[in-house]
Image (cartoon, rainbow, N blue to C red):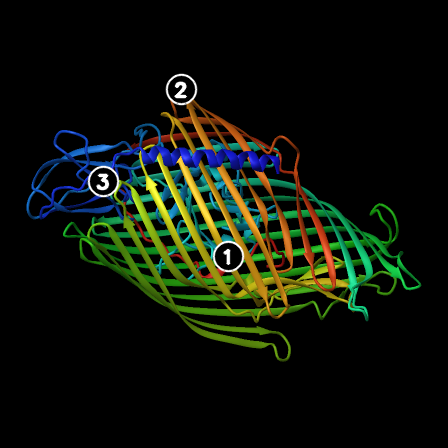
């Protein structure tokens, strides 16, 4: 952990510096009281999108002592009250934008100012795309934004690589994602679900090229307008898109020892019509090896456990994946008040994982306790095949109401997604320690075809009652149909002439889930310093499931009321906010947890889902302080969450079949207390440093298993970027975490690091980027232990993660500065998602 300690020390050094820089700002004196009031909005000059939480300061006509200040809201709106009449200057600023100062006149009445625009620190239009220079990480009161396109070390990687560098997010050796120590997190693409992410999430994240990703948004306290996803929060992957007037595009290629890809995009907008397209092909290679040691116990009359036997397993494997992703979006804006969108995207991915497995089990000798005799020894040659195809279709209409009611909006959205997932494996078992030796004694063939279809209709309405109060309301219906048809055939070569169907491990599973939801959120401001948001969501869920055979039907219906509250206060200094939030969330188990398909690629362990799971209900509380300046930002948060019927993975040993069985159940109370710290600093022009620290204490208690597990966990992240002249830039990152705890298991963490250098070419139309990650050693071992009354297991997963990539990207076309409509998107973030468990 020497590297982790070093990185943690660097992070601790960054945050106090950021705080010191912020503290150096002058204290805002109280302005002379008056009856004047200024209202307005801050927008991005290129995209015309709101600049969230910009700092607005009222200055005298001469001098620099602030007279009044405030922070804009998430729509860029602001209000200054109780102002004296006269002529003043208004200063508007936010991290990554050039500060703007405008002359304003205050009267004794309310004055509505025209929208102000801020220009990114670096902005180029013409023969290249817009390349606004923003910090790698932005801290906002309700979220952290990791601007992945500003980090050169991402070129040629995947979404999984980017998430590993995102503040508060951990990605383990299997590719499973955690946010603030919990895997109960919903991942969206462009603020909406995708069929690509509905199955094996760990594999899906390797299919999204980093070159297509603009930013990662981490929302830890979602409001009621989000679906009732809960305890961890929302991670939104924002893909690159440009809707400025003109035609532009890009082509790129990456070569490396882990990832190879080709990608391209073409975007065009002429008047009322626009089109955005993407096309990517990729290939990934992930070698690994693993080992497991398990000791089995039997009860003894004296109450102490006696050793029954010991298992030793070793395997060497690699995952070879390839696929492609395509997207097309059409936009039509017949007038400034109406906007239509129609889009579709598709993905295809297939992988092969050849594996060699060594298995040895030794039992104790009854006549000589403590001594072992050889019971089972064999090797297996295993090949797992995985194929995934999906598509999403989206349509939307947005109605705005002009300058008279600039915040009033109505939208209707529809989405249809479908995926087809085929997983199969074959194994040949040899009566020897080496697959090259010994006779073939046993064979298995397994096939699983899973389908998932989802249709969503949604409408949202925003109504401003005044410049300081707004009502948001909406309704949604989601219809999900999931099926899984799985089978397994076996052949015992000494007994059978051909394969025979295993009835116990073959079946067909159909699952239907219908959700009807409505929400309302009311937000208002008091005295220009207090902002309130009160909301609630009502959700009705109907579930029907069926297996083949007798007694194969089940159902579950439930109604949930899910309140939400947020209170923030703007403090005396510009850009400082104190915020408290509470939310109750629901997480329905997804197919990953429900599918009863038995995955047994190794002889001594199986895993399967539980179709009788109930949804989780989580209460979350968060108190945060944030301050934002032109060169520094700091965010400190403390939080707690409690899930009373947590879905937990648990293991049990089946003595009759001599194997470990892994499944899920609503059998624990999961409570977490945490503290997070984020800071950023820009020491000089062109140099950005940011760091995130998070520590939490997790306690999991299960009355059903009479077991309590707890652990203090920590994670950190450090990013830095430096521009060297006009054509070169250097970037680096480092991060790590101490591990985590589950009901019956504990797992170790690890560290990640990388550096990159980028050079612009061809008059800034092209980039050449060289990246190296985890280069000090060829791989890293991840360890975990599982302890039950019946066995104790220790596993080691060694992943070869040293990587080198060379990427080239070329941009073409010409843009004209113009408006970009802000469009709503569907957000289906209500399901508890899975990780790398097979068979989905």
Instruction: Determine which residue is flagged by label 2.
Output: 725
Task: Label 1: state its secondary structure.
Answer: strand
The residue positioned farthest toward the top in the image shown: 725
The residue positioned farthest toward the bottom in the image shown: 550
Sequence-first disc among 3 and 2: 3
**Distance in Å between CA atoms under marks 2 and 1:** 46 Å
Task: Label 3: state its secondary structure.
Answer: strand
Q: Residue at x 81, y 56 (%)?
A: 310
| Residue 734 at least partly seen | no
Of circles 1 and 3, the one toward us is 1
Instruction: Determine which residue is flagged by label 1.
Output: 672
Q: Residue at x 40, y 54 (%)?
A: 622
In the rendered image, residue 20, in percent from the top left (x then y), is placed at 36, 34
Instruction: Determine which residue is flagged by label 3.
Output: 56
| Residue 64 occupies quadrant | top left
Give the total number of marks visible in the rendering: 3
In the rendered image, residue 155, in percent from the top left (x then y), is placed at 49, 34
| Along the viewing direction, whichever of 445 and 200 lies nearer the viewer | 200
Circles 3 and 2: CB atoms closer than 8 Å: no
| Residue 146 occupies quadrant | top left
Q: Residues within 10 Å of mark 2 (few under 14, many from 20)?
A: few
Of circles 3 and 2, the one toward us is 3
The quarter in which the C terminus is drawn is bottom right
In the rendered image, residue 222, in percent from the top left (x then y), is placed at 38, 56
In this picture, is 28 found above or below 684? below
């Amino acid at each position: 952990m020497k590297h982790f300690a070093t990185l943690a020390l660097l992070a601790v050094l960054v945050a106090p510096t950021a705080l010191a820089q912020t503290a150096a700002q002058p204290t805002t004196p109280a302005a002379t009281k008056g009856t004047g009031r200024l209202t307005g909005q801050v927008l991005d000059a290129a995209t015309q999108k709101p600049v969230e939480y910009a700092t607005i300061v009222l200055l005298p006509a001469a001098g620099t002592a602030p007279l009044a200040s405030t922070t804009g809201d998430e729509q860029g709106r602001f209000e200054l009250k109780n102002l004296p009449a006269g002529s003043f200057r208004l200063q508007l600023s936010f991290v990554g934008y050039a500060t703007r100062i405008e002359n304003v006149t205050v009267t004794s009445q309310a004055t509505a100012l025209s929208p102000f625009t801020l220009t990114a620190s670096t902005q180029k239009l013409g023969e290249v795309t817009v390349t606004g220079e923003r910090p790698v990480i932005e801290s906002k009161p309700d979220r952290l934004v990791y601007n992945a396109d500003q980090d050169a070390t991402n070129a040629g990687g995947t979404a999984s690589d980017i998430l590993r560098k995102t503040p508060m997010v951990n990605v383990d050796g299997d590719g499973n994602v955690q946010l603030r120590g919990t895997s109960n997190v919903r991942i969206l693409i462009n603020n909406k679900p995708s069929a690509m992410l509905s199955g094996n999430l760990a594999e899906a994240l390797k299919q999204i090229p980093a070159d297509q990703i603009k930013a990662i948004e981490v929302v830890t306290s979602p409001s009621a307008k989000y679906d009732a996803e809960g305890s961890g929060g929302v991670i939104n992957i924002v893909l690159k898109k440009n809707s400025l007037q003109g035609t532009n595009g890009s082509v790129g290629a990456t070569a490396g020892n882990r990832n190879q890809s080709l990608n391209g995009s073409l975007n065009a907008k002429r008047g009322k019509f626009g089109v955005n397209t993407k096309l990517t092909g990729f290939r990934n290679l992930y070698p690994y090896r693993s080992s497991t040691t398990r000791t089995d116990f039997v009860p003894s009359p004296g109450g102490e456990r006696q050793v029954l036997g010991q298992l030793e397993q070793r395997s060497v494997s690699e995952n070879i994946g390839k696929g492609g992703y395509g997207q097309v979006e059409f936009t039509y804006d017949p007038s400034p008040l109406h906007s239509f969108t129609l889009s579709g995207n598709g993905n295809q991915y297939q992988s092969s994982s050849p594996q060699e497995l060594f298995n040895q089990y030794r039992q104790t000798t009854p006549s000589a306790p403590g001594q072992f005799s050889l019971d089972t020894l064999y090797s297996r040659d295993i090949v797992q095949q995985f194929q995934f195809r999906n598509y999403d279709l989206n349509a939307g209409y947005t109605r705005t109401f002009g300058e008279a009611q600039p915040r009033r909006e109505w939208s209707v959205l529809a989405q249809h997604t479908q995926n087809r997932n085929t997983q199969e494996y074959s194994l040949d078992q040899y009566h020897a320690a080496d697959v090259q030796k010994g006779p073939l004694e046993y064979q298995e063939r397994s096939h699983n075809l899973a389908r998932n279809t989802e249709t969503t209709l949604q409408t949202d309405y925003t109504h401003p009652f005044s410049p300081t109060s707004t009502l948001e309301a909406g309704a949604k219906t989601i219809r999900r149909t999931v099926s899984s048809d799985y089978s397994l055939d076996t052949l015992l070569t000494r007994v059978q002439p051909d394969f025979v169907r295993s009835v116990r491990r073959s079946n067909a599973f159909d699952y239907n889930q219908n959700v009807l939801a409505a929400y309302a959120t009311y937000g208002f401001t008091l005295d220009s310093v207090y902002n309130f948001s009160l909301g609630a969501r009502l959700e009705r869920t109907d579930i029907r499931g069926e297996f083949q055979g007798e007694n194969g039907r089940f159902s579950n219906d439930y109604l949930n009321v899910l309140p939400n509250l947020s209170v923030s206060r703007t403090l005396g200094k510009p850009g400082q906010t104190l915020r408290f939030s509470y939310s109750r969330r629901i997480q329905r188990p997804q197919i990953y947890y429900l599918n009863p398909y038995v995955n047994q690629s190794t002889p001594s362990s199986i895993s399967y889902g539980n179709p009788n799971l109930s949804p989780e209900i989580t209460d979350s509380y968060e108190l945060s302080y944030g301050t934002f300046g032109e060169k520094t930002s700091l965010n400190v948060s403390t939080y707690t969450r409690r899930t009373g019927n947590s879905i937990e993975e648990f293991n049990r040993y089946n003595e009759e079949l001599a194997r470990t069985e892994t499944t899920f159940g609503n059998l624990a109370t999961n409570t977490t207390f945490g503290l997070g710290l984020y800071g950023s600093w820009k020491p000089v022009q062109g140099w950005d440093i940011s760091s995130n620290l998070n520590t939490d204490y997790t306690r999991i208690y299960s009355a059903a298993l009479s077991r309590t597990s707890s652990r203090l966990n920590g994670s950190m992240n450090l990013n830095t970027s430096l521009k060297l002249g006009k054509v070169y830039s250097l970037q680096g990152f480092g991060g790590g975490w101490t591990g985590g705890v589950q009901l019956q298991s504990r797992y170790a963490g690890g560290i990640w690091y990388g550096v990159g250098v980028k050079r612009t070419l061809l008059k800034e139309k092209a980039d050449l980027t060289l990246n190296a990650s985890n280069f000090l050693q060829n791989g890293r071992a991840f360890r975990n232990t599982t302890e039950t009354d019946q066995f104790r297991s220790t596993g080691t997963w060694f992943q070869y993660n040293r990587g080198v990539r060379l990427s080239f990207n070329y941009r073409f076309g010409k843009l004209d500065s113009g408006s970009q409509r802000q469009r709503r998107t569907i957000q289906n973030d209500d399901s508890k998602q899975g990780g790398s468990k097979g068979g989905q």
